[in-house]
Amino acid sequence: MFYNERMFDIISGLTTKEKLEILADAAKYDVACTSSGVDRKGKKGFLGNSESCGICHSFAADGRCISLLKVLLTNHCEYDCKYCINRRSNDVPRTAFEPDELCRLVIEFYKRNYIEGLFLSSGVYKNPAYTMQNICEVLSLLRTRYRFNGYIHVKAIPGAPDELLSRAGYLADRISINLELPTSESLSKLAPNKNFNTILDPMSKITGTIASDRLAVGKNPRMERSNINNYLAGSIFNTSENMNNSIDGSSEGYLTGHDGNIGENVLPAVSSTESMHRSFAPAGQSTQMIIGATPETDLTLIRTTQHLYQNYDLKRVFYSAYIPINEDSELPSLDTAPPLLREHRLYQADWLLRYYGFHADELLSESRPNFNERLDPKCDWAVRHLEEFPIEVQTAPYDKLLRIPGVGPKSAKRIVQTRRYTSLDFDILKKMGVVLKRAHYFIMCNGRMMYHIPIKESYITARLTDEEHKDNWKVVHQNEKYEQLSLF
């Protein structure tokens, strides 16, 4: 347990509520999953269930919490990562939950309909093995003693023994290891206690174990994606191009040395009693990168993201805008605004990689390595490739329709289905869900554009920027307060 030794920096005598206030606040900078990704019905004798799209981070109008309890097991940390509020050199109140204490809290909150699941992370107390052992004890108690059948997302500790990572994977629904930063140079500068090998090696083993577990029950070893990808020959999930070299083409600094052979590198098995015949991390594996703490370009970030999806079959890559909380010469100044709009654009670009058939080097280039933050990445790509437009919606194939700004997977499918029986016009497209205020610059219906406009980058960019001005303002100004709503 946490209190047996080295109590010089752990506050003793705190109530569970006081611990929760400290440890929930300390966890707010860790980006959680936005949906569980796993369906699990209720079982007789167990408490809770999980819906694949049922875990979200919001509160209902009547005050009910419909989210995960996002909390740290402890905010004590042996590491001194310069960007982290819980780093060793910071003078902050330190505390820790006892495993059973946290379990009781989760169950009581679940019974009161405050939460639908648990998102558990931790600072590194003593060493990675000791910390991961305590995390696994929490998970084991929840699944066995308390019969909790709800959703659990756990952050694994890089450097922990394989046996503990395997145990956590069978007890949790999703497991993740934070990459933190996209290059080894930045990681060594800001997180001197971490390195890519200790992060990527367990990430590779978790990937292999998920794949092996899926194969054992007759599933595809790779994680399920949208059916959309079945129609996209160039999807990053079915391409055979070699992405095992350095992402930027250079010989150092980026993710290298991991071939991503799905299913060949696996974690050791755990006892049947511990796994309780559960699937290994059925909601997959994810990671997080911090945006804005270091000078990497958007191109570097999305190349790293593409590499992670292709070679580690991650379910999601999350981006966290850096919030200046520590004063350090290696970090942006404390008065620097968090890059919220940039984070928003990277999430949109991530969506294009996963569901629209785009590749990182299509969206950006060495000559233009950053997105135009005033435009969404799809529009930004389109205005830089006007030679491909306007596209005739009456005849264009599905993958071409997906590249039109304002056309999504559903509306593209409706276009393909409807044009078999009737001639399309702009009114029909609008009823199908096509966002014409963006799409009309890039499409034709039966050889005719909606308006007579010049097909020029400067003109279209100016008009689209004006259209998005209000939404961009909301992204920046409606998310200025970085607070988790208190449960009290």
Image (spheres, rainbow, N blue to C red):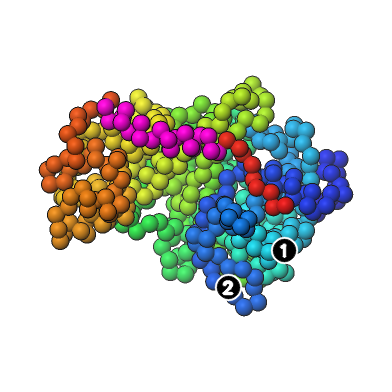
- Identity of the amino acid at label 1? Glu
Q: Give the mark nearer the N terminus: 1 vs 2.
A: 2
Which residue in the protein does label 2 denote? 42
Q: Secondary structure at mark 2?
A: loop
Magenta span includes 441? no
Start-end of magenta stretch: 459-479
Determine which residue is flagged by label 1.
108
* Residue at 73% from the left image edge and 55% from the top image edge: 134
Q: Residues within 10 Å of mark 2 (few under 14, many from 20)?
A: few
Q: Position of residue 156 (x, y in %)?
A: 62, 50
Q: Say which amino acid is labelled 2.
A: Gly
The image quadrant where one finds the N terminus is: bottom right
- Placement of 75 over or under 268, stated as above or below: above
| Rendered view: 469 above or below 48 | above
Tell me which residue sits at (62%, 30%) in the image: 324
Q: Secondary structure at mark 1?
A: helix
Give the side of residue 111 with respect to residue 215, left or right.
right
Residue 395 in the image: state x and y as whole percent: 15, 50
Of the two numbered discs 1 and 2 in the rendering, the one whose residue sits closer to the viewer: 1
| Residue that protrudes farthest toward the left in the picture | 447
Query: Toward the viewer: 287 or 400?
Result: 400
